[in-house]
Amino acid sequence: MSMNLRTHAFAGNPLRSKTPKSTDLFSHSSAFESLKNLIPLIPNHPTPSPDFKVLPFSKGRPLVFSSGGDASTTPIWHLGWISLADCKGFLGSCGVDLSEDSLVYLGPKTEEDLVFWAIDVSEENGVASEFGGRKLCFVELRTLMVAADWADQRAMDELAIAGHARALLEWHNVSRFCGSCGSGTVPREAGRRKQCSNETCKKRVYPRVDPVVIMLVIDQENDRALLSRQSRYVPRLWSCLAGFIEPGESLEEAVRRETWEETGIEVGEVVYHSSQPWPVGPSSMPCQLMLGFFAFAKTLDINLDKDELEDAQWHSREDVKKALAFAEYRKAQTTAASKIEQMCKGVERSQSLSTDFNVESGELAPMFIPGPFAIAHHLISTWVDQGSGDVHSKQQASVSLSSL
């Protein structure tokens, strides 16, 4: 069945929504000054106010723990926040000094008197085993994305926080040098920007977002949708077309160009649906912004670009509706959550999530679409749920996040 969310996965970060003004106690500048003053005093310092919590990352994977489950409940993962003292202790045991330049500010929870930071410990050998003693482990963000219970607001909040933190840390990793003069860059404003270290340059560098258009192409009769496969997809997975925006190009133009280049289909009207931050792409593009559209085809013949796609086909509304019903997204979520629990216990377990998408008879579903963590799911399910309605109407086709 299709799923409805109040916001897309990775959106609605509660820390970002509450980021205070620069003059407030919880602002990044105030928190950074407190951090610089506090680090030399740890661990011989009482709990500061506000208290600092740190989320370590290793190779793009956040630290998490699992609350476990029994025969009737699904394990639940949570972010592995540690204290500043514990962070310094773990790094110190690996021969590494904690410094204010290694931490990135995420935001506060003012009502709980907490300030949150992230740190990349990818280069610190031995850190993983140190955390493992506490039943904590580093887990891929994509695995957490599938394992998150989308009906649980806390789970979606933690997923959004982890996505934001990964995007910032990966951006720091790929922006170590100035693009103007080639000199090294240094963090500024608690890791919220970087600056060239060359005194004659001092170029400011800010986190970037790579915009991507993702579109559900629909025929003029509103009876069929164009879905595609890439070679990297798991078997039987079909999704929407997508592509990057080129310089000097509008969003609508990008939708039309990408559809034409990949499938040879000409698109006319383009209608906006919604957008989603996507911090689980390659590390070279730390955060993408998925911009979702309905696109209405003017032609139907497919001329596939084999360098881009493995296949593309028109699918009837009924077939797509069945694909939504066949895909047991809850089962996939349970499987991923159990995998995380095993990892936190020190037991590696490999299992393809594609094997979970079966029909009631136990046979493999002929096709399925991405889960509710992806904007493609909501583009497709919105079209299916509209039935024979007029999706050309922007009032019907354009969906606000409050109704997701």
Image: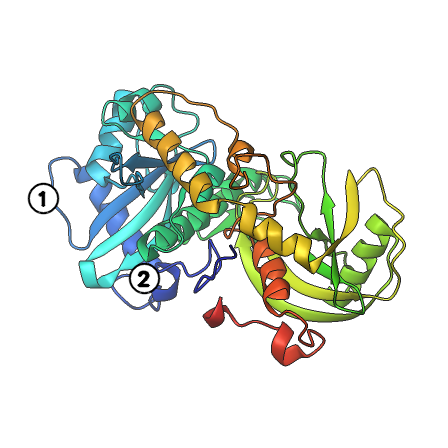
Quarter of the view holding residue 31: bottom left
Q: CA distance from mark 2 to mark 1?
A: 22 Å
Seen in the image, is 317 located left or right of residue 378? right
Element carrying mark 2: loop
Residue bearing the label numbered 2: 27
Residue type for callout 1: Pro
Q: Which residue is mark 1?
A: 46
**Colour pattern:** rainbow
Among the 4 quarters of the image, the one containing residue 390: bottom right
Whether residue 2 is visible here, answered yes or no, is yes
Residue 153 lies, in percent from the top left, at 34, 57
Which is nearer the eye, 179 or 290?
290
Q: Residue furthest front?
A: 361
User: Which residue is drawn at the image coordinates 58% and 47% (left, top)?
Assistant: 370
* Of residues 98 and 403, the one drawn nearer to the viewer in this rendering: 403
C-beta proximity under 8 Å, tags 2 and 1: no
Q: Nearer the viewer, residue 9 or 19?
A: 9
How crowded pointer 2 is (Cα within 10 Å; few <14, some 14-19, many 20+) is rated as: some
Residue for point 54% across, 32% down: 355
Q: Amino acid at mark 2?
A: Ser
Label ID, residue 316: none
Q: Is residue 347 above or below residue 211?
A: above
Within-10-Å neighbours for mark 1: few <14, some 14–19, many 20+: few
Residue drawn at (47%, 62%) of the image: 4
Q: Residue at x 9, y 44 (%)?
A: 46
